[in-house]
Image (spheres, helix red, strand yellow):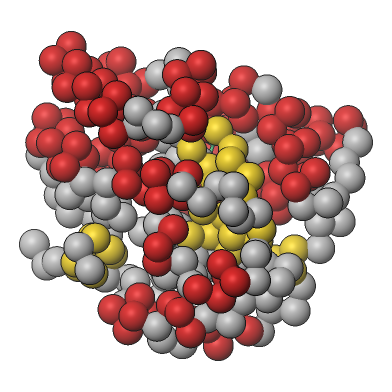
Amino acid sequence: QLSVLHNFKGILFSTMSSKELLNSLDSFDAREDDVFLVSYPKSGTHWVAEVIENIPNAGITLTSPIEFGDISKFEELKAYSKRRVIPTHLNYDMLPVNVKQKQCKIIYIVRNPKDTAVSLFHYYRDNPNLPCVETWAAFFELFLRGDVVYGSWFDHILSWEEHKNDKDILIIFYEELKKDFAKSLKKITTFLDINVNDNEINKIASKTSFSEMKNNAVKENFDPNHTICALTADRNLVFRKGVVGDWINYFTSKQKRVFDELFTEKMKHSEVARHLKEFS
Ligand code: A3P
């Protein structure tokens, strides 16, 4: 198999994120009103992006991920005149220095890691831009070791959580979006200083439901250069099940034990971890 991933400073990236681009991230010229939509892969990025796009009069443009493409990326991003919403799966340390200096707003999406692992397993199987993986058991080991695209889930979350108070960061939970959509949406709109009324909230909810988004993906022709995910532009690969708790159909009791032990150890000081436990 031709290599679809490459190792950049110890973390695996898609070859669609060129080394030159990854090396030059710090030369990105951020604008003060940029919003970064950050997540570990399979945490609900497409969903939240669609929610933001459907906010009336938001005055924003959703761009492709900052790490997707080659060195011409920054020229492409310059061309947008509206407020940019820029998705990324980068960890905190790799985020362009300018974004940190200018205190750009950041929405960080978190999803329970067991469901994230199962979702990423299916992405590995279905997405030709990711390596082949034979079994769930084999993938589970890779995920535990952080030997997957964008590295360890734990390291990703912790890198961002460490900075949640010194930057303008809003943390959104996939599970909370599922449980109380209006509450999560209001958090997002308040954070972005946009007003929405109840009627608008209901409209956004129905336009961004799993079934609606899945059906639309089937109808769309995709543009390979316009994507929310640096791992594919084909939205048909994204909408799989869209539920909370599917991990139970994959994890053996031993895998659950091993995972929970690692989680407890790695996340012992994490407030995000405590929230995730409340949802499960
Ligand atoms: P599953 O594979 O568990 O179904 P990302 O957008 O970060 O790649 O995340 C993809 C995951 O979010 C997939 O999870 C996908 O089904 C789920 N998802 C996408 N849109 C959704 C929606 N509108 N409602 C609920 N889940 C959604």
* Residue 8 in the image, given as x and y percentages of width and height: 23, 69
At 22% from the left and 22% from the top, the residue drawn is 261
At 81% from the left and 56% from the top, the residue drawn is 58
Q: Which residue lies furthest to the top in this view?
A: 253
Residue 176 is left or right of residue 3, and the answer is: right
The answer to whether residue 10 shows anywhere in this view is yes
Q: In which quarter of the image is the N terminus?
A: bottom left
Q: Nearer the viewer, residue 228 or 180?
A: 180
Q: Nearer the viewer, residue 6 or 103?
A: 103
Residue 199 is left or right of residue 211, and the answer is: right
Figure label count: 0
At 34% from the left and 80% from the top, the residue drawn is 23
Q: Nearer the viewer, residue 112 or 3?
A: 112
* Residue 86 in the image, given as x and y percentages of width and height: 58, 64
Please determine whether, in this image, residue 87 is positioned above or below residue 247.
below
Q: In which quarter of the image is the C terminus?
A: top left
Question: Which quadrant would residue 11 be assigned to in this image?
Answer: bottom left
Q: Which of 185 and 47 is in front in this view?
A: 185
Question: Which quadrant would residue 115 be assigned to in this image?
Answer: top left
Please determine whether, in this image, residue 67 is positioned above or below residue 88.
below
The answer to whether residue 106 shows anywhere in this view is no
Residue 187 is left or right of residue 109, and the answer is: right
* Residue 2 in the image, given as x and y percentages of width and height: 11, 67
* Residue 204 in the image, given as x and y percentages of width and height: 76, 38
At 48% from the left and 60% from the top, the residue drawn is 88
